[in-house]
Amino acid sequence: MQGADPTTEAILDAAVVEFEQHGFRRVALDDVARRARVSRTTIYRRFSNKDELVAAVIERENVRLFADIAVELKNAAPQSNYYVEAFTLSIMKFRRHRVLERMITDEPGLVIELAATHYRAGIERMAEALRTIFPTGLAERIGEQAVTELADTILRYAAMVLLLPSAQPLETADDIRAFATLHFLPSLPVALRAVPAR
């Protein structure tokens, strides 16, 4: 959440710590308020309920995660196809994230609930991240529809890898690359397959 006021940032910071330590379901707003050194009323002025707070934490952490991924992709030569590498890096970074990984591991049902409510916003955030991650001019060359289709495809395949069991191991970066090459890459929008990223 860019431009958030210091009190909101303190609340989100406190929520991250509480969610990391205790899980999303078990944390009460009183716990967050105590850690942030604010009143429950202060939290309710910014978030109407705990679900809104959870969504705000996830959004902020996703924004930070994608910024980190963008920097790493721009500074490293991909070991394979650019799209495969971007997908692989995204999965590996997500799994190492202290709160997002806990949500996937401990609360897969919550992930589905949040997806049902916030999927359109998730596509928009992912598309915005792609515009940042892409090499200069690529988003303009492939067009807005292709960027949106790619965002949707990434979210669907990432959910598959993160939430569902697999017949093949999907633990290492090489495992993810192999999966992405075999399944994710062929599913990309035609406009992307026609215009290489590099």
Image: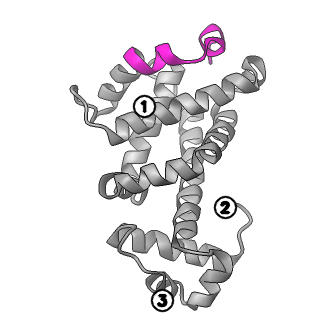
Q: Taking the image as drawn, is residue 198 in sight?
A: no
Q: Earlier in the sequence, mark 3 or mark 2?
A: 2
Amino acid carrying mark 3 in the image: Arg
- The residue labelled by disc 3 is 34
Query: Could you say which quadrant of the image residue 7 lies in?
Result: bottom right
The residue shown at (75%, 27%) is 144
The residue shown at (52%, 31%) is 154
- The residue labelled by disc 2 is 1
Q: Please provide the residue range marked out in magenta.
A: 182-198
Amino acid carrying mark 1 in the image: Thr
- The residue labelled by disc 1 is 88
Q: Main secondary structure of the magenta part?
A: helix
Badge 3 crowding class, 10 Å Cα cut-off, few under 14, some 14 to 19, many 20 or more, is few
Which of labels 1 and 3 is toward the front? 3
Which element is circle 2 on?
loop
Residue 40 in the image: state x and y as whole percent: 56, 88
Badge 2 crowding class, 10 Å Cα cut-off, few under 14, some 14 to 19, many 20 or more, is some
Q: Taking the image as drawn, is residue 196 in sight?
A: yes
Which element is circle 3 on?
helix
Which element is circle 1 on?
helix
Q: Earlier in the sequence, mark 1 or mark 3?
A: 3
The residue shown at (36%, 35%) is 161
Q: Earlier in the sequence, mark 2 or mark 1?
A: 2
The residue shown at (34%, 71%) is 21
Q: Is residue 187 above or below residue 105?
A: above
